[in-house]
Amino acid sequence: MQPMDELGLDTQAVRAGIERSQFNEHSEALYLTSSFVFGSAAQAAARFSGEEDGNVYARFTNPTVTAMQQRLAALEGAEACVATASGMAAIMSMVMALMSAGDHVVASRGLFGATQQLFNNILSRFGIETTFVPATDLDAYRAAITPKTKLIFVESPSNPLTELVDIAAVAAIAHDAGVLLAVDNCFCSPALQQPLKLGADLVIHSATKYLDGQGRVLGGAVCGSKKLVDEVFKFLRTAGPCISPFNAWVILKGLETLRIRMDAQSSAALQLASWLEAQPQVARVYYPGLPSHPQHELALRQQGSGGAIVSFEVRGGREEAWRVVDSTQIVSITANLGDTKTTLTHPASTTHGRISPEAREASGIRESLLRVAVGLESIEDIKADLARGLARI
């Protein structure tokens, strides 16, 4: 049979990770079991010790989860993947597996609010310190690295301002210093961007978003070399932030339509971003697919398209932004993204509401900012829905 890594991404999205049971099912099976039976005491011992491959206990081995991991690894061009209970669990598992008290992280400043909370308020209590730098400033990454630095962590594009990190350039900086680079690839997914091919060591996913694609389940993943992912797996096996087989199965099926969803949603997002730029009530639009984006050229080199997230600032502040939100009749007022249904959120009071006002300002999260995650509805209907609120400003 032709090796999976020689096949195209669309074929991998449908075929990678399939291992049929004795029933020879066509659709991937869902294995809902907490444990697995051994043929003998010797086999049980061999499985537990790792001398023999096979399933042991669903906290860390399950055929459905394995299929999802293999499929996502194929899409990212990774040697291995370990799935977790959520995107935040993926970040936590990676850091806890690969770092120790006294180690140091350099992170891009515009990280998702919960990620900032994890680094600043939780990991810092265990002696892991983080320095935040402007996402686009290569000299700042170099200057922030110390002898204790073990990891550079970035989002590209960032949430919600769609700032891009030059992944290849930051990877070179990291590797020159003997430091790992991890990239949160949530906004693009492997359909639009493969950070490992640009030099990253690890890729992080909130599989809750585009990998599922329909707002159904939570999940996360860490992809990379077998050596690094094995360390994350060891942490997950003991600490337990694992994905459920059902959630893995839903995400596994979501991956089958990843490319066509991302293409359609990205195309609609570009139309919406162009329309928003022409509205007099809009002060600024953030979208990598627009020529007005400061890193548009980088987006053309690094991504397959501009993606499906459009953020924009209205003229005014929180009152005017909330007026737009409250006037909608079609889009969903929710902080999730990556759904087939378009969602709208006010980041300063939701996703980034727990970080300090100073940190929000440093990250560019203003009260006038709104984030739209474009779904699969008629784009004309989405424009009309937002126009209702814009007309009230």
Image: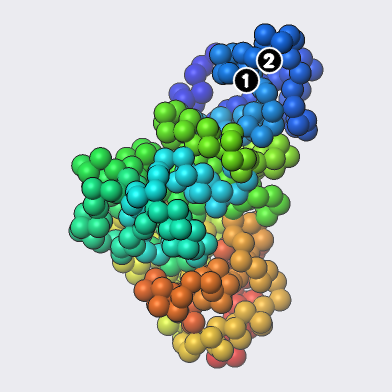
Hey, which quadrant is residue 85 in on the image? top right
Confirm whether residue 222 shows in the render.
yes
Horizontal side of 263 relative to 193 (left or right) equals right
How far across and how far down the image is residue 352, in percent? 51, 70
Task: Please give the name of the residue rendered at 23% of the width and 48% of the height, measured from the top-left corner.
Answer: 147
Instruction: Work out whether residue 236 or residue 108 is closer to the camera in this orientation and state it.
Output: 236
Task: Say what secondary structure mark 1 lies in.
Answer: helix
According to the picture, the residue beneath numbered tag 1 turns out to be 48
Task: Please give the name of the residue rendered at 46% of the width and 87% of the height, measured from the top-left corner.
Answer: 315
Q: Is residue 163 positioned above or below 54 on the image?
A: below
Horizontal side of 139 relative to 211 (left or right) equals left
How far across and how far down the image is residue 99, in percent? 40, 43
Instruction: Work out whether residue 58 or residue 18 is closer to the camera in this orientation and state it.
Output: 58
Instruction: Work out whether residue 62 or residue 213 is closer to the camera in this orientation and state it.
Output: 62
According to the picture, the residue beneath numbered tag 2 turns out to be 44
* Neighbour tally class for label 2: few under 14, some 14-19, many 20 plus, Cα within 10 Å: some
Tell me the amino acid under the disc marked 2.
Ala
Label for residue 105?
Answer: none
Task: Say what secondary structure mark 2 lies in.
Answer: helix
How far across and how far down the image is residue 321, in percent? 55, 83
Instruction: Work out whether residue 335 or residue 372 is closer to the camera in this orientation and state it.
Output: 335
Task: Please give the name of the residue rendered at 69% of the width and 50% of the height, measured from the top-left corner.
Answer: 217
Q: Quadrant of the C terminus?
A: bottom right
